[in-house]
Image (tube, rainbow, N blue to C red):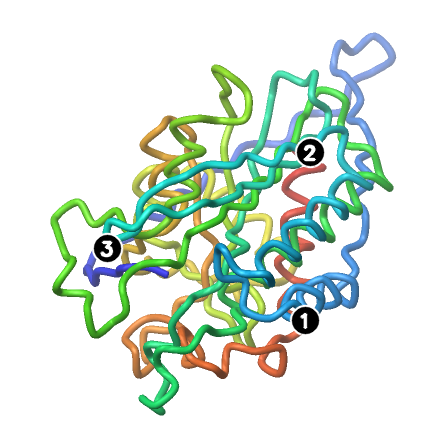
């Protein structure tokens, strides 16, 4: 993950209010509100799915661990979704080398016209290029937080979608992107830099141009990235606010209603080049729920980012549960 930029900007907070309407009598035309049953997220289950991914080893594309994890993810989602599509593609890395990737798409309520995309990347970084020990900086990482945490939350959500049917008119597409994290090693970053830095998020770039259904349109999308660390700081990432302010406000309001304001900050965060960028450019307003730590030594992300410390020991069940709880409420109350 990802090239980042720092920016100073002002955030506008919109507050609306209105008078309560008097209760209608027996002849009132007001429709009674339907009771919405939101399933309870199981943080232990989400954590188990993170652990299962890291158990394969680093999920670097075109490795055995990557292939085994792809098969496991596909099997899991097949148990819960109406349809699972494995979108195989070939693309080029920053150095011109061709490489194969797999996006994994789980479809729920395929006939519903109103659709929401929930997504994360499932590959892991081939280089620990921010590790404090330079001797290990060219080794791949587990990517427990940077990748597996978002996937773990989405797998638990998928299990809940199976157990507690979604609203009839709402469809969900869970998209697990490949090749998000295969940008150049930090030592080579400037050698490959260009103004259209598109060496990251290769799977979402492909899906945004070639969605799993021809002419696919979604109401909005929510991307999860690094959602398993301790003391998370989910600021309103700048591109999310710019492209999809109404979506980020919807999600952050729900987080506040659920008592998670300590995690979901109203502060405007930095600009992050992530999987949501090509999605927004393709016409799906998409936000990025991502842990931003402005005081970290790397300038923005958690201290374990792109190091060998991004392992299961640094995953917090509570954080996974909070993010999953917010997602389930947003979806079922849509």
The residues bearing labels 3 and 2 have C-alpha atoms spaced at a distance of: 32 Å
Q: Is residue 282 above or below residue 216?
A: below
Does residue 8 appear left or right of residue 226 in this picture? left
Residue 93, above or below 161: below
Residue for point 78% across, 62% down: 45
Q: Nearer the viewer, residue 331 or 79?
A: 79
Query: Around disc 2, counting alpha carbons within 10 Å, would you say few (fewer than 14), some (14 to 19), or many (20 or more)?
Result: many
Indicate the quadrant containing the N terminus: top left, top right, bottom left or bottom right: bottom left
Q: Earlier in the sequence, mark 3 or mark 2?
A: 2
Q: Report helix, strand or loop for mark 1.
A: helix
- The residue tagged with tag 3: helix, strand or loop? loop
What residue would you read off at disc 2?
Answer: 84
Q: Position of residue 181 (x, y in %)?
A: 40, 58
Q: Tell me the number on the disc at residue 95.
A: 3
Circle nearer the viewer, 3 or 2: 3
Where residue 327 appears, as percent x and y from the top left, is 63, 48
* Distance between the alpha carbons at the discs numbered 1 and 2: 23 Å
Q: Is residue 111 left or right of residue 288?
A: right
Q: In which quarter of the view is residue 182 placed?
A: bottom left
Residue depicted at 63% across the width and 50% down the height: 70
Residue 118 location, x and y as percent?
57, 41
Q: Is residue 163 left or right of residue 118?
A: right
On the question of residue 242 being in view, the answer is yes
The answer for how far apart the CA atoms under marks 1 and 3 are is 29 Å
- Confirm whether residue 262 shows in the render: no
SS type, badge 2: strand
Q: Nearer the viewer, mark 1 or mark 3?
A: 3
Which residue in the structure is indicated by mark 1?
Answer: 55
Task: Measuring from the top left, give residue 7's x and y in whole percent.
Answer: 19, 59
Q: Earlier in the sequence, mark 1 or mark 2?
A: 1
């Amino acid at each position: 993950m990802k090239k980042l930029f720092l920016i100073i900007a002002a955030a506008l907070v919109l507050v609306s209010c209105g008078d309560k309407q008097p209760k209608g009598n027996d002849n009132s035309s007001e429709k009674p509100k339907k009771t919405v049953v939101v399933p309870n997220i199981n943080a232990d289950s989400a954590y188990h799915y993170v652990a299962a991914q890291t158990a394969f080893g680093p999920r670097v594309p075109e490795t055995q661990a990557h292939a085994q994890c792809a098969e496991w993810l596909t099997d899991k989602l097949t148990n819960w979704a109406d349809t699972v599509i494995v979108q195989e593609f070939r693309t080029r890395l920053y150095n011109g080398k061709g490489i194969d990737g797999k996006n994994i798409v789980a479809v729920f309520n395929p006939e519903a016209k109103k659709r929401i995309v929930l997504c994360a990347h499932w590959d892991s970084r081939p280089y620990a290029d921010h590790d404090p020990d330079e001797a290990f900086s060219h080794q791949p990482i587990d990517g427990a937080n940077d990748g597996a945490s978002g996937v773990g939350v989405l797998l638990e959500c998928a299990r809940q979608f199976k157990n507690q049917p979604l609203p009839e008119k709402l469809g969900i597409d869970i998209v697990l992107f490949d090749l998000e994290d295969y940008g150049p090693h930090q030592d080579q970053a400037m050698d490959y830099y260009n103004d259209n830095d598109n060496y990251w998020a290769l799977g979402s770039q492909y899906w945004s141009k070639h969605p799993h259904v021809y002419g696919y349109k979604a109401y909005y999308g929510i991307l999860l990235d690094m959602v398993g660390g301790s003391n998370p700081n989910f600021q309103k990432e700048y591109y999310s606010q710019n492209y999809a302010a109404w979506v980020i406000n919807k999600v952050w309001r729900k987080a506040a209603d659920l008592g998670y304001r300590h995690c979901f900050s109203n502060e405007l965060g930095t600009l992050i080049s992530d999987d949501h960028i090509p999605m927004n450019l393709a016409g799906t307003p998409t936000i990025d729920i991502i842990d931003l730590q402005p005081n970290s030594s790397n300038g923005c992300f958690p201290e374990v980012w792109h190091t060998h410390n991004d392992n299961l020991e640094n995953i917090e069940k509570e954080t996974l549960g909070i993010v999953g709880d917010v997602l389930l409420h947003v979806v079922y109350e849509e």
